[in-house]
Amino acid sequence: MNAGKYRHKVTVQKRTVTGQTSTGAEIVDWITAFPTRAGFSKLSARDFIAANANQSQIIGNFTIRYRDIADGEYRLLWRGKAYKIIAFLPDETSGFKELTLPVSQDI
């Protein structure tokens, strides 16, 4: 593996419900699931146009080393911004080498 590929420090957070308000609304908190290193790639112009045709808000992909991920809603923090993680996609060859995380900015 090329260590330069994972050059960005990111934090993956998991959404948790910590309680309810008096009106019954959920109180949501984001807890750190794990810090990791990742690679980032923006969508190409062709991919961006295709994503917009499907009403998708995906702006790019982060790539991290493989790890088991529990079910739930996650976000990724990078350079002071939060990105919604759409999915954790395993690599095509073994499925256990790395994960691709398509992200959007609509948190």
Image (cartoon, grey):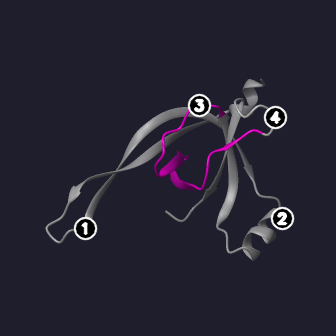
- The kind of residue tagged 4 is Thr
Label 3 to label 2: alpha-carbon separation: 30 Å
- The kind of residue tagged 1 is Ala
Q: Earlier in the sequence, mark 4 or mark 2?
A: 2
Q: Looking at this view, is 53 or 89 the one in front?
A: 89
Q: Looking at this view, is 31 or 78 the one in front?
A: 31
Label 3 to label 4: alpha-carbon separation: 16 Å
| Mark in the foreground, 4 or 2 | 4
Q: Residue at x 67, y 62 (%)?
A: 58
- The kind of residue tagged 3 is Arg
Task: Read off the residue under disc 4.
Answer: 93
Q: Position of residue 93 (x, y in %)?
A: 81, 34
Q: Earlier in the sequence, mark 4 or mark 1?
A: 1
Task: Read off the residue under disc 2.
Answer: 45
Q: Which residues are magenta?
A: 65-91
The N terminus - image quarter? top right
Q: Residue at x 55, y 39 (%)?
A: 10
- Which dot marks residue 25? 1
Q: Quadrant of residue 83?
A: bottom right
Label 4 to label 1: alpha-carbon separation: 44 Å
